[in-house]
Amino acid sequence: MKHVAALAGVGVKTVSRVINDEPNVTEATAERVWNAVRELDYQLDLQAGSLRRADGRTRTLGLLVGSVDNPFASAIHRAVEDIASARGVAVFASSMDDDAGRESEAVRAFLQRRVDGLILTTASDHPEYLPLLRERGLPVVYVDREPVEPEVDSVASDNRVGAAVATAHLLAHGHRRIALLTDRLDLITARERRQGYLDALAEAGVPVAEELIVTGLRDAEGAQAALARLLISDSPPTAVFSAQNLITIGAVHALRAAGLSRSTALVGFDDVALADLMDPGVTVVAQDPQRMGTLAAERLFALLGDDDDAPTKTVVPVALIPRGSGEIAPQPTS
């Protein structure tokens, strides 16, 4: 710590105040101290420090996402880290693969590490660890998905409206047989997107074709197989709404394999890599995971700063991006 103080041009006590997030330190001084910490690669003994500090803070957060290899989740991860690192806080991140058991294990591991707060994506409506979090009084913000609880802080996309916009876009281009490919309906995002799809059909007076609704899809391979079956049915869809980014990738593969990528319309929920470079480009309803991660992290730090306002549910708007695949008209029947 003496070396950090010398490099920053401050006293050891000032370094201690900055590291322990104590008051009465200017932003300029704190910035000099953290620059010195990084330059010297100074390793803080967070557990020992937390025992000495009155608030018991460890300057760490726990972040749980669906899967860190999914671009949507990794964008949230990066945004949270950007906000946290600017405050000298480390982020422990974990994937749950939408498995409630792994979710609970990860949360308990975070608690064992004595993190100061949690940003969680949940795989279930009623996580078994909720009573434990309430007992601990740990600040928690849910991102993307939240439990069915009356008072929680959350940041999520406008899933229902976005799905309705996607489906209405296909309806406006003349489609009436629109397939829905979506995730498991025990996930709140899948339920909301399915409901948005149904809302748009009802608004247009189009009957629901249950045989065109496929739920329970977990990955691109499953989505590809599901759509391939629909495409060879007696009455195939003329358009597809794929309600998740990995499902969209599977749908693209199925349409290409069947030679139908230029004759069957497709709109995906959430953007996918290189979607604008495909032929045709993939029309999507884009989420803003960076904004979601930023807002979730900022809200968590507000809670750590003793913000006693009522819990807030922040809804992040989505945007339709037409690129070609969603603007294909129904083909004449022979």
Image (cartoon, rainbow, N blue to C red):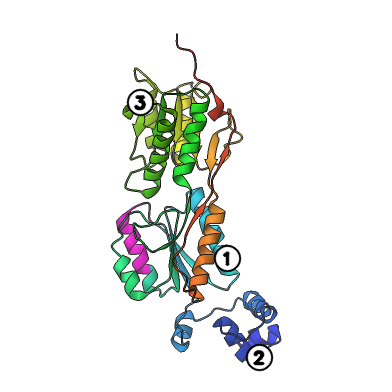
At label 1, counting other C-alpha atoms closer than 10 Å, the crowd grade (few under 14, some 14-19, many 20 or more) is some
Q: Amino acid at mark 3?
A: Arg
Q: Which residue is mark 1?
A: 83
Coordinates of residue 323 in the picture (x, y in percent):
60, 32
Question: For the point 38% across and 39% down, which residue is it?
Answer: 194
Magenta stretch, main secondary structure, is helix
The secondary element bearing badge 2 is classed as: loop
- 123 or 322, which is in the foreground? 322
Q: Is residue 334 left or right of residue 288?
A: left
Numbered badge on residue 104: none
- 273 or 178, which is in the foreground? 178
Q: In front of the other: label 1 or label 2?
A: 1
Mark 1–mark 2 Cα distance, whole angstroms, equals 27 Å
Coordinates of residue 64 in the picture (x, y in percent):
42, 60
Q: Identify the image quadrant of the N terminus.
A: bottom right
At label 2, counting other C-alpha atoms closer than 10 Å, the crowd grade (few under 14, some 14-19, many 20 or more) is few
Q: Is residue 77 above or below residue 300?
A: above
Q: Is residue 106 magenta?
A: yes
* Dots 1, 3 in contact, CB < 8 A: no
Q: In front of the other: label 1 or label 3?
A: 1
Q: Which residue is mark 2?
A: 11
- 238 or 7, which is in the foreground? 238
Precedes in sequence: disc 2 or disc 3: 2
The secondary element bearing badge 3 is classed as: helix
State which region is magenta.
96-109
Q: Amino acid at mark 1?
A: Ile
Numbered badge on residue 229: 3
Q: Is residue 180 above or below residue 35?
A: above
* Dots 2, 3 in contact, CB < 8 A: no
